[in-house]
Amino acid sequence: MDDAYSVKTTATEVTDAVTGEPEPTTRLMALKDADTFAVSDDFGDMSGGADGLFDQDTRILSRLVMTVGRQRPSRLSAGISKDNVFFICHSTNRPLPPMGKRSTPGGVLHIERRRFVRNRRLFERIRISNHGIEEVWLPLAFDFGADFHDIFQVRGTPRARHGEVSPPVHDGRCVRFGYRGLDDVERTSCLTFSEPPAKLTGARAEFVFTLPPGRREDLYVECGVVPADTPGEDRFRRHAVEARLAMRTRRRRGASLRGPRSPRFNLWLDQSRADVALLTTDLSTGPYPYAGVPWFSTPFGRDGIITAWQMLWLDPSLAKGVLTYLAARQATETSAFQDSQPGKIMHETRQGEMSRLGEVPFGLYYGGVDTTCLFVALAGAYARRTGDLETIRAIWPNLKAAAGWMADYGDPTGEGLIAYQRAADTGLSNQGWKDSEDSIFHADGRFPKGPIALLEVQGYAFAAWRAMADLSRLIGEEAPAGYLAKAKRMRALVEDRFWIEEEGFYAIALDGDGQACRAIGSNAGHLLFTGLPSKDRARRVIQRMLGAEFRSGWGLRTLAHGQARFNPMSYHNGSVWPHDTAMGVAGMARYGERDAVAMLLHEIYSAASHFDLRLPELFCGFEREPGEPPIAYPVACMPQAWAAGSVFQMLQAALGLTIDAVDKVVTVDDPILPPGIEQLNLSRLDMAGETVDLAFRRTADGTVVSRRNPERTVKVVNAL
């Protein structure tokens, strides 16, 4: 993801009033539904930092802080449900203010905050139960506000001017907020309580409950862009059921993968599948995996394509949705501000005020040099996986336009290499997946001048040209020879210009003078994924990537240890990105490497175990130490779509599975299971209208595969 803008985070340490012990530092917790997401600390509070309720890239609720007896309750536990629908915080009271001669000690009340997001609204239930032996007089209050900040403003981009926030308007149980932006759009939100507060202002609601022993009280709260019916138990339950059913539907799309005797591993698969489902939004063009919560909860071209590719073997519907959406937003004109040229595929889209006004270029931004190539390559992979040539014919004009961009605008030097140089200072300076400002450099640390040709992008282009040749054959549109010639030329250029013989590795890029940036990075793993390198050079690359320079013990670093600018705490220069490791693993598998594939899959699984089985966007690249967890990157998105999808890409690589619906063949090539996993069952694999079920089982002689529905016409071929 791009880090051209900073991210503000909040962390709070609270001292328990009963024990005097410091409570754990709070974490940001996120929920999402379509274009609405909520971020709070693990008390459930929003304090106006990096948190809030966001709708279409605008923060419609910036503050919601609950106090019990004029102080924060003492947290017991907090988390997100396994299906990613609910946030739940369990807490208890601190000593309450005296009522007459009696005062209530701490630890008597159980306080549960349960919330979810559905249909552009936040729904919350506060349930308070009295476990004491006396009646409790309970003062409960909420401080709230709505600043209507654009998401880029929340993330740290300064604004010289703002629109006008209207004074809050409140009646018996509802507070309405309003803002007219500089784009002349009226944005509103409404905070409503199920019970009329004893005192209500435009910034605070105060309640007083009397709770007998053994009784409980429920208070319902809703916040959305428009007023709705009064919150209550029926609305909460009905919308909660809808949210769970919608999530279940998304989670159950496609094939199922289970380890019958591996419960912990299954939990990782379930969490990863749930994270992909959470981030997937059903658009008019089909399902699209948004990049990550909270800061990238929007369609990104590169992230959507790679996530769809990771999930393609299990759930092709994501790839169809991504291809259709991106085709509809393909550039048709040249714009320096948007970094667009005809045929180019979108990098990012946003809906907020700053994007609408052009204060940032990301309303519809095309500054990704790799997305167009990946779009074409994914189309080729999708066609082979599904045999859905109807979709390919529908987007064929877009594929041809994308290929035209690659041959024209994407090749500014005319040499046949895809290169970038931002057209305006407002755009991203680096435009590959490593898009931070310091991620591309020469061996001595100098930054290169443009246009810059990234190593992995040439691999994507190689795959794209081959895909165009295959697709043109399949739909009978034109002769494929020209596309194959371009792929052949791309391979020759990369092998000649990027290879560093004395390093046994590929340069990370070529600069504007055609000089190699001889830094050694994980980009070569992506090149392996595309199948461009010769077998001998692939073997040398794999050997080096499996050495201590790259392997942290928790996965592969983005930059080899010892390189200029190496920093295990950096965003792209030595950290570990799960999706990056997964691309390298898939590349190694392509060249017949088996043991390392299982080993790296096990390392990523071990890392996930320390992150509650939810892989973050990235984590630090420090060397693994016995008995110590991986070190978190402080502002990593979690969940992140391509991090969640990485387990499935690595498992496909480990199982050696290739699915060709055109020829109706499933090929299994030298499968291997990760350490500790004795069996994996693949069920409901849809192919050409048939269902294929496979079982992979470890034996003394290796991993064997058996078919559980042999009567079907689809062939299952063991490549060995």
Image (cartoon, rainbow, N blue to C red):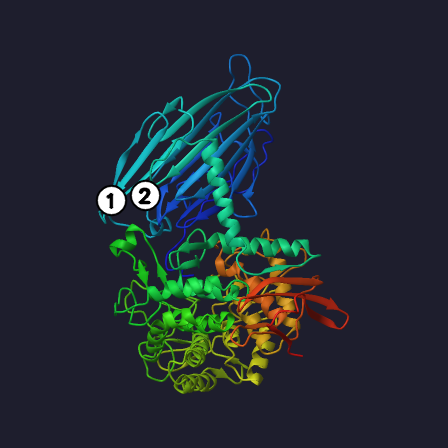
- Per the model, the C-alpha gap separating discs 1 and 2 is 9 Å
Which quarter of the rendering shows the C terminus?
bottom right
User: Residue 163 placed where, x, y %?
Assistant: 24, 44
Q: Please say whether residue 213 is visible from this viewpoint.
A: yes
Sequence order check: which comes first, mark 1 or mark 2? 2
Q: Please say whether residue 639 is visible from this viewpoint.
A: no
Number of labels in the image equals 2
Determine contact: label 1, label 2, CB under 8 Å.
Answer: yes
**Which residue is at the front of the view, 72 or 458?**
458
Residue depicted at x 62% and y 69%: 712
**Which residue is at the front of the view, 688 or 620?**
688
The numbered mark at residue 518 is none
Residue bearing mark 2? 148
Residue depicted at x 41% and y 78%: 475
Query: Label 2: how many residues lie within 10 Å, few (<14), some (14-19) or many (20+)?
Result: many
The picture quadrant where one finds residue 133 is top right
The picture quadrant where one finds residue 486 is bottom left
Disc 2 residue type (three-letter): Phe
Query: Label 1: how many residues lie within 10 Å, few (<14), some (14-19) or many (20+)?
Result: some
Helix, strand or loop status at disc 2:
loop
Which quarter of the rendering shows the N terminus?
bottom left
Disc 1 residue type (three-letter): Gly
User: Residue 612 placed where, x, y %?
Assistant: 59, 51
User: Residue 482 placed where, x, y %?
Assistant: 39, 86
User: Residue 558 placed where, x, y %?
Assistant: 51, 67
Q: Is residue 193 left or right of residue 260?
A: left
Helix, strand or loop status at disc 1:
loop
**Vertical arrangement, residue 134 with respect to residue 294, above or below:** above
Residue bearing mark 1? 163
**Which residue is at the front of the view, 562 or 410?**
410
Q: Residue furthest right?
A: 700
**Vertical arrangement, residue 400 with respect to residue 183, above or below:** below
